[in-house]
Each structure stands twice: as structure tokens, then as C-alpha cells.
Amino acid sequence: MTADKQGCGYATDSPYVELAVEIFAMLADATRVRIILALKDSGELSVNHLADIVDKSPAAVSQHLAKLRLARIVSTRQEGQRVFYRLENEHASRLVADAISQAEHSLGGTPRHHHTDREPV
């Protein structure tokens, strides 16, 4: 049974723990979280469009995207001179959604994500 846990990475001695911490560190930035939310909602966006959405300069957004790309959280597609960014997979957006749900709990009361009439995250 222990071998099964190690194979999937959920054991306390998993070699993935340190990498998971690096992912959390990468996501510990409000601009990067906003970029991930924008890409989750839109699928694929250019730097300029992302900059408009997150209200940051294109240069700042580009630097954040470069870090997210190195971490393999986002990937790119080039069309002529324009580069479009998209999430590499659904895991980063799920981490962000879970973090926002946890943040909602810290406000007290019944969090929005527990309402039956809510929109999906």
C-alpha cells in the first residue's frame, strides 16, 4: 500500500513535495493569480489583452508570463508577430479556485461557493 502512495506522489516522503512548494510560491502573487483566472475564463489571450484585464503594463505581464511559462503553468502559440498564452492544463486554475474558496471561508458566514444558486468557479 505504501508503494501505491509513493507512486502517485501523495506520501509524506514524496519527491514531489518540494516541487509542489515551488508551485505554491509561483502562485503567491496577485497578478499571476489574476492572469490564471483570465486565461481560465478566456482560454487564450495575448500579452496586451491580459495586461488590460489585470490592469498592469504589458511589460509587467510579460515578465509574469515568462515565469509561469518556465514553471510550465502556461504555454504559448505564435501567430505572426503575436504570441498567445493559454493554461498548460487545468491544475493551476483548480489550485487558484480552491485558494479563492478557502479565502471566502476566512470572511465568515456562508461562502459564495456553498450557495446552491452560484455560478461555477
Image: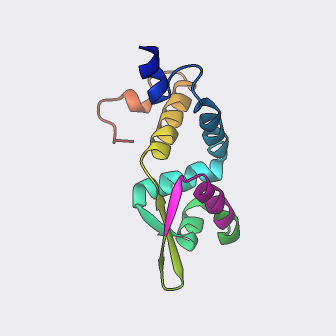
Q: Give the image location of residue 64, x and y in percent.
A: 66, 59
Q: Give the image location of residue 53, x and y in percent.
A: 54, 63
Classified by dominant secondary structure, the portion drawn in magenta counts as helix
Question: Is residue 100 at all visible to an observer of this figure?
Answer: yes
Tally of numbered tags: 0
Q: Give the image location of residue 2, x and y in percent.
A: 46, 15
Single out the residue that lies furthest toward the bottom. Answer: 80
- What residue do we see at 40% from left, 61% from top? 43
Span shown in magenta? 62-76
| Figure quadrant of the C terminus | top left
Name above or below for residue 73 compared with residue 20.
Answer: below
- What residue do we see at 48% from left, 68% from top? 45
- What residue do we see at 69% from left, 63% from top? 63
- What residue do we see at 47% from left, 45% from top? 93
Q: Is residue 73 magenta?
A: yes
Q: Is residue 6 magenta?
A: no
Instruction: Specify how the rendered protein is coloured.
Output: rainbow
Position of 86 compared to 17: left or right?
Answer: left
Q: Give the image location of residue 60, x and y in percent.
A: 70, 64
Of 51 and 46, the residue lying toward us: 46
Question: Is residue 56 at all visible to an observer of this figure?
Answer: no
Single out the residue that lies furthest toward the front. Answer: 3
